[in-house]
Amino acid sequence: MHYADLGHIKLHYLETGSPDGPPLVFANSLGTDLRLWAPILPLLPKSLRIIRYDKRGHGLSECPRPPYSMGALVQEAESLLDYLKVKECVFVGLSIGGMIAQGLAVKRMDLIRGMVLSNTAAKIGQASMWDDRIKAVQTDGIEALADSVMERWFSKNFRDTKELNLWRNMLIRQPSHGYMGCSAAISGTDFFTPTSGLRLPTLGIAGSEDGSTPPDLVLETVDLIPGSSFHLIHGAGHLPCIEKPDEYAKVVTKFLTDIGHV
């Protein structure tokens, strides 16, 4: 267990793999912590330096009072990579993590040489939708949203398994302030213009059953970046790294191999 003291906040992070290997950084979705990536880690090349972290208000990181801005989340990812002396990583971001990836690539191209934009977009939802979610959590806690979130996160087949309870528990045990704060950050973000100016290797991943960021939305964002590629994982929802870890790891590994990052 490691904490990076960034001055204004302490973030929890984990490093595994080869300390001297090419860095691969993971940023997870709203309502999850860094354990989101555990199913795919054994399936990735052993040569990688793998870094996972909990963004503010999630997992074991500190949880300031909401609202948060996307700028703060991007700056904290930037500060964490500087703290860990990371340069030219491939950044894998899922959902809000993919928004952080886009913002960081625009701000600090020296830090990122490639991106995996998984189940994300340049803009996700409308402000009124996020306002409603924030009010619901404020009034009744995250559990008030849990069942509807599970429907967006996972395919029907997965929702019929006992494993669903693990991820539902992860969601409802995240700090309410963190969930509300990051919801506000998503609500205020529109990266269409800055992302369209990016020029770096990019892979988009979508799940065919994703109720949060449908495939067309992911593809629309990935297509903003010339030369990008796109992969659709059939039978998976918003978290394909959970439902289809073998396919997810295979696609990410091919991308890393194609750009010489293994």
Image (cartoon, helix red, strand yellow):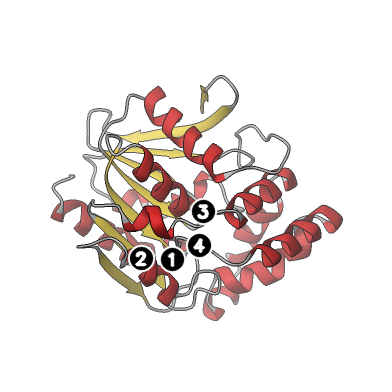
Which mark is first along the chain, 3 or 2?
3
Which mark is first along the chain, 1 or 2?
2
Q: Are marks 2 and 1 in contact (CB under 8 Å)?
A: yes
- Which element carries disc 1, helix, strand or loop? helix
Disc 2 and disc 1: Cα gap in Å?
9 Å
Q: Estimate the x, y position of residue 193 in percent, counting from the top left.
A: 40, 57
Q: Quadrant of the C terminus?
A: top left
Disc 3 and disc 4: Cα gap in Å?
10 Å
Which one is in front in this view, the residue at disc 1 or the one at disc 3? 3
- Which element carries disc 3, helix, strand or loop? helix
- Which element carries disc 4, helix, strand or loop? loop
Which one is in front in this view, the residue at disc 2 or the one at disc 3? 3
User: Which residue shows up at 54% across the image and 64% down it?
Assistant: 124
State the mark number for residue 205: 2
Quarter of the view holding residue 227: bottom left
Q: Residues within 10 Å of mark 3 (few under 14, many from 20)?
A: many
User: Which residue shows up at 48% across the image and 34% down it?
Assistant: 75
Total tally of numbered discs in the picture: 4
Report the residue that reaches farthest toward the front. Answer: 193
Mark 4 sits on what residue?
Answer: 123
State the mark number for residue 240: 1
Mark 3 sits on what residue?
Answer: 96
